[in-house]
Amino acid sequence: MDHAESLRILKRDLRFAPLIKKYGPPQLIQRGQKARLKVFDALLRSIIYQQLSGKAAATILGRFKTIFNPTSPRATKGTQKFPTPAQVSIMSVEKLRSAGLSQAKALYIKDLAEKFESGVIKHRSFSRMESQAIIEHLLQIKGVGVWTVHMLLIFTLGRPNVLPTGDLGVRKGMQRVYKLKSLPTPSEMERLAKSWREHASIAAWYLWRVADEK
């Protein structure tokens, strides 16, 4: 993701220029930088984190990893490896649930692993695919929605042009920045973003910062 070009464009906008000055450069993946998580790992983590607090989800993720790393149960979350799709595919739902997963999430994770292991999900082709095509491709996985894929595109694949119209934080940030009376709809967001649409991932990072302000 080319932060320099995106910042150059966004600085032209009187709404974003002061935000860039206030918050500094965005903390996102730079073009050419290795993604922090593999696609499978990122989607697995996202499913576990759905509808949970960060602390609770992190605990479950740690237990989940321990299932596949039984020799190091006390290893920190950062040192435990994610399992491979093959490892998850052969693990029983009951065993997955022992980490604290709901029945639905355990089934989602099994479906995710099986689709990766069988080759249904062609993640190695993502570098040649448009963002919208990746969204449509990944929606065939149970438990994966548009928001999840938007986060993958921004934080794992480093796509510069993702506008997560379903993200509450981005909507709140846009409402404040544009002084709107109510949260914008997806179509309103697209209209307001027209001048910086190709750099929407960076813009979203600043909108999240605004939304986090008290």
Image: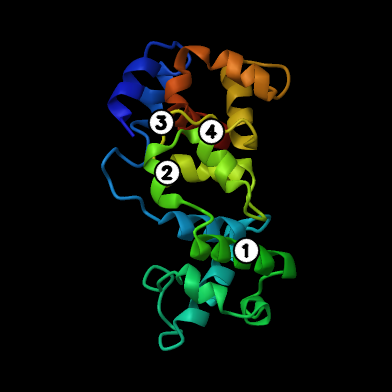
> For the residues carrying marks 3 and 2, which lies nearer the camera in this image?
2
**Which of pointers 4 and 3 lies earlier in the amino acid sequence?**
4
196 lies left or right of 89:
left
Per the image, label 2 sits on a secondary structure element best described as helix
Snapshot quadrant of residue 161: top left
26 lies left or right of 197:
left
* Circle 3/circle 2 CB separation < 8 Å: no
Residue located 59% across and 64% down the image: 57
**Residue type at tag 2:** Phe
The numbered mark at residue 132 is 4
Residue located 35% across and 23% down the image: 6
**Which of pointers 1 and 4 lies earlier in the amino acid sequence?**
1
Residue located 63% across and 29% down the image: 171
**Residue type at tag 4:** Gln
- Binning the other alpha carbons within 10 Å of mark 3 as few (below 14), some (14 to 19) or many (20 upward) gives many
Snapshot quadrant of residue 30: top left
**Residue type at tag 3:** Pro
> Marks 2 and 4, Cα distance to the nearest angstrom?
11 Å
The numbered mark at residue 126 is 2
> Marks 3 and 2, Cα distance to the nearest angstrom?
14 Å
Per the image, label 3 sits on a secondary structure element best described as loop
Q: Position of residue 169 (x, y in %)?
A: 60, 36
* Circle 2/circle 4 CB separation < 8 Å: no
Q: Is residue 72 above or below residue 189?
A: below
> Marks 1 and 4, Cα distance to the nearest angstrom?
22 Å
Mark 3, residue position: 160
Observer-nearest of 175 and 31: 31
**Which of pointers 2 and 4 lies earlier in the amino acid sequence?**
2
Mark 1, residue position: 111
